[in-house]
Image: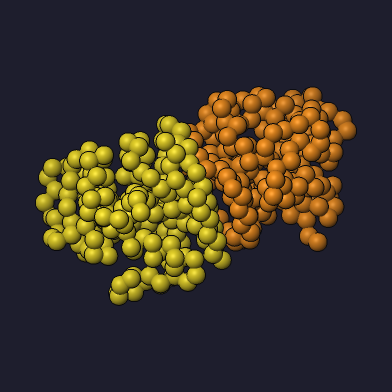
Chain colours: A orange, B yellow
Amino acid sequence: MTSHSVLHMSMSLDGYVAVPDDGPGMGLGVDGGVLHDWLGPSTAERPWFDPPGVSGQVFAELMTTGAVVVGRKTFEYAGQWDGDHHGVPIFVATRDAAVHDVRPPYVHVVDDDLATLKAWAKEAAGDADVLVHGADLARACLEAGVLDDLELAVVPVLLGGGRRLVDALGTRVALEQTRVLVAPAVTHLRYRVVR
Amino acid sequence: MTSHSVLHMSMSLDGYVAVPDDGPGMGLGVDGGVLHDWLGPSTAERPWFDPPGVSGQVFAELMTTGAVVVGRKTFEYAGQWDGDHHGVPIFVATRDAAVHDVRPPYVHVVDDDLATLKAWAKEAAGDADVLVHGADLARACLEAGVLDDLELAVVPVLLGGGRRLVDALGTRVALEQTRVLVAPAVTHLRYRVVR
């Protein structure tokens, strides 16, 4: 089995992954929770969510990735996941050398180029996939040609504003539609990046 | 059967319905044809396209609508369809009173408000649905609360720029996901606007 780098994102039909007022500890923005309705209620136990049916399958895939690569902003907005995202190494990509609050044992702050970062994350993940987290990082990975797959939960709402998945990428990226899973109030679209 | 107003659109995964250089006679923009790949080759005969499988079903639904409502710009970009879009009344919405080149018998240029326009189109369509055509008109119809359904062909490509389906709508619109049809290189998502 070949390890892939996979972006998991929930997206509104008009292409937003967060409402305008997203910020630290509020990654989807105030009143942006509709994007995660498909996950159902969260719990303090792991796994955090237990969505039914095919949504559960997609969430289980996310939770069996072998490493997480995340942008600095998303990492902070998510409250640093209290230092632990399903017990796998977390690589926080940043250009800010003044980052100090690393949380052992999982969190590694790295300023390498994305190709090197991907190689590190894949080595850490072994045969498992690498979870790519955050819109800015996704864009950077697409531009650097190091994103393998996109797994998007398309949510039935027009948000009308906010942070876009990839805004004006500036280059065309061909995709192969590799899987579609349909749940009552969300559609899970999976694509492979064609290079 | 209740007649609905239905927006049919092909959209890239990053939410574009045309590449940046769209213009008269080139509605998708130069090199924007990838958005219509799912339709297959066009012919001079009616119907213009004959896509296989579920894509054929969706196209047949478009071609059995009973009236077309279209914005002025889209109408021009589409070459006015040579005055005939599958033999049904065409209502061209415009605020420009200087429009002269109406083509009988199908094309009606109207400057009424959208609610009145919708009522006219539904009366013309009878039991059939009304086809809503064009991103600007779709946005106006959403804002005016007169769009009933969206039928989107999500195409496996990131275009990286162009004209968006609805850009910064400024209001949230709740949708009900009513149908998902999967073809090899396109996914057809259908939604009902929830008011």
Observer-nearest of B46 and B21:
B46
In the image, taking residue A138 as reference, residue B165 lies left or right, namely left
Residue B130 coordinates in the image, percent (x, y) = 31, 53
Residue lying at 20% horizontally and 62% vertically, measured from the top left: B83
Give the residue at the far right of this rendering.
Answer: A105
Quarter that holds the C terminus of chain B: top left
Residue A15 visible to an observer of this rendering: no
Observer-nearest of A141 and B27:
B27
Observer-nearest of A121 and B114:
B114
When asked about the image quadrant of residue A36, the answer is top right
Residue lying at 36% horizontally and 43% vertically, measured from the top left: B147
Residue A168 coordinates in the image, percent (x, y) = 49, 44
Q: Is residue B48 above or below residue B17?
A: below
Residue B110 visible to an observer of this rendering: yes
In the image, taking residue B34 as reference, residue A99 lies left or right, namely right
Residue B72 coordinates in the image, percent (x, y) = 24, 49
In the image, taking residue A51 as reference, residue B151 lies left or right, namely left
Observer-nearest of A146 and A76:
A76
Residue lying at 64% horizontally and 30% vertically, measured from the top left: A27
| Tally of numbered discs | 0
Residue lying at 44% horizontally and 39% vertically, measured from the top left: B194
Give the residue at the far front of this rendering.
Answer: B1
When asked about the image quadrant of residue A77, the answer is top right
Residue B188 coordinates in the image, percent (x, y) = 49, 57
Quarter that holds the N terminus of chain B: bottom left
